[in-house]
Image (spheres, grey):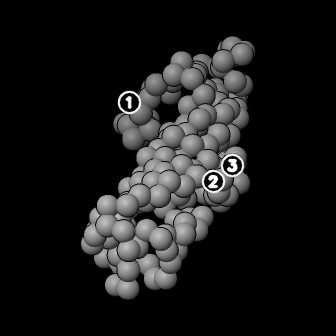
Amino acid sequence: MLIDIGALKGETGGTKAFEGVEEVKPPSDEIDIGEVRVEGVCTNTGDAILVSGTVRAEVKLPCSRCLAPYSIALEREFVEQFVEGEEAGDDFRAFSGDSIEIHDIIEEAVLLALPMKAVCSPDCRGLCPICGVDLNYESCDCEQKDLDPRLAVLAKLKGVD
């Protein structure tokens, strides 16, 4: 998303609102990121152009317990400073000319908003580790052993299966 800030550059304290839709590439084939809606404001602070806003998207991804696809609504705020004609630093990004490109900021905000462990519901029971049946809808007769695999060698020595 390209934001035209030509008129804003000479006006310290001036602001310019922006909004739009952006495409973001998902981190894997299992995740589907719909259109990302972006809205925000650019502010000329005198030393830099401060860009702040919010990204919103509907994302379809698989549950990490039962593998069923489900959707979540993502929302994340972002704030970034842009300085003209300098190399990017830890505290700011560089720009030149009369526009600022914020696609990378939008993509970063969406990816950071994705859950680390996606779960369709807090009480999802997942799949049976032995037969693979979805325990949310069916039950199985598999014998569940709660033996820590790191202790399997000790269990063999003791003769426990």
The mark that comes first in sequence, 1 or 3, is 3
Residue named by callout 3: 35
The mark that comes first in sequence, 1 or 2, is 2
* 107 or 152, nearer to the observer: 107
Residue at left offset 38%, top offset 37%: 151
The mark that comes first in sequence, 2 or 3, is 2
Q: Which mark is residue 20?
A: 2
Write down the quadrant of residue 121 in the picture.
top right
Write down the quadrant of residue 49 in the picture.
bottom left
Residue at left offset 55%, top offset 39%: 74
Please state if 147 lies on the left or on the right of 63 as rendered: left
**How far from the left and from the top, in percent, is residue 98?**
50, 78
Q: How many marks?
A: 3
Residue named by callout 1: 158
Whether 94 is drawn above or below 45: the answer is: below
The residues bearing labels 1 and 3 have C-alpha atoms spaced at a distance of 58 Å
